[in-house]
Amino acid sequence: MAVSDPTLEVEFDLLRTGASFVIGCDEVGRGALAGPVAVGFAAVNSSVLPIPAGLRDSKMLSEPRRELIAPLAAAWATYSAVGLASAAEVDELGIIACLGLAGKRALAELYTQGVDVAGSIVLLDGSDDWLNKALATPLNVVTRIKADRDCGSVAAASVIAKVHRDRLMIDAHGEAPGYGWASNKGYGSAAHMSAIDLLGPNPLHRKSWLKISA
């Protein structure tokens, strides 16, 4: 697969429509068996500097590279935030509702930082606007397939959220090392599934997902 560097072409096009910010948005942990789902935001405006060298969609970067790039991405974005929804909430509400819940929490953090959320455009990776489904007052959301690959703000959101969630799973590994979360980050690797069979589920597991996997 050819490596693709993101640009800010889409963001500048959207900013020219009068938006205060373009808020890049991506989710992490949607398909994991354990741990929270995370939604990252990276807000940029017309004064944004060039994209940091090496910033790409988190899936295109190794873990050491993500650790190096994440603080650069957070410093580059005018504002950034990560929201979480827990495994228990995923079991109770379902994953789509929890994407919206995590996004709503991250938006609240952006608002407290001073972002004019209502006057901004959210650039969301993918084709489904799961964010507005969770909001009482809809925002201006633009969906774009492969935005995490092509758009700098979404790539930044992707890396910031990925590193944030990965660190949570590494910390969780210290409390429950038998599941290998430091390496699998809660995803359903063969070793992780074997550990669940041996040890049983942990409170951080999405119990409804284990039933599906079984």
Image (cartoon, rainbow, N blue to C red):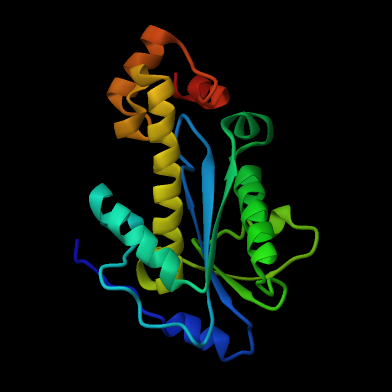
Above/below status of 99 relative to 78 = above
Q: Quadrant of the C terminus?
A: top left
Image coordinates for residue 51, horizontal then vertical, percent: 35, 77
Image coordinates for residue 209, horizontal then vertical, percent: 52, 27
Looking at the image, which residue sits at the far left? 2
Give left or right: position of 66 versus 205.
left
In the picture, residue 114 is in which quadrant?
A: bottom right
Q: Give the residue at x 63% y 82%.
A: 20
Looking at the image, which residue sits at the far top? 198
Q: Quadrant of the N terminus?
A: bottom left
Q: Give the residue at x 55% y 22%.
A: 207
Residues 180 and 100: in front is: 180
Give left or right: position of 187 versus 131.
left
Image coordinates for residue 144, horizontal then vertical, percent: 49, 69
Q: Is residue 64 visible?
A: yes
Looking at the image, which residue sits at the far right? 136
Q: Is residue 146 visible?
A: no
Residues 127 and 153: in front is: 153
Give left or right: position of 130 versus 166.
right
The count of marks equals 0
Image coordinates for residue 211, horizontal then vertical, percent: 52, 20
In the picture, residue 23 is in which quadrant?
A: bottom right
Q: Give the residue at x 56% y 86%.
A: 15
Above/below status of 56 relative to 168 = below
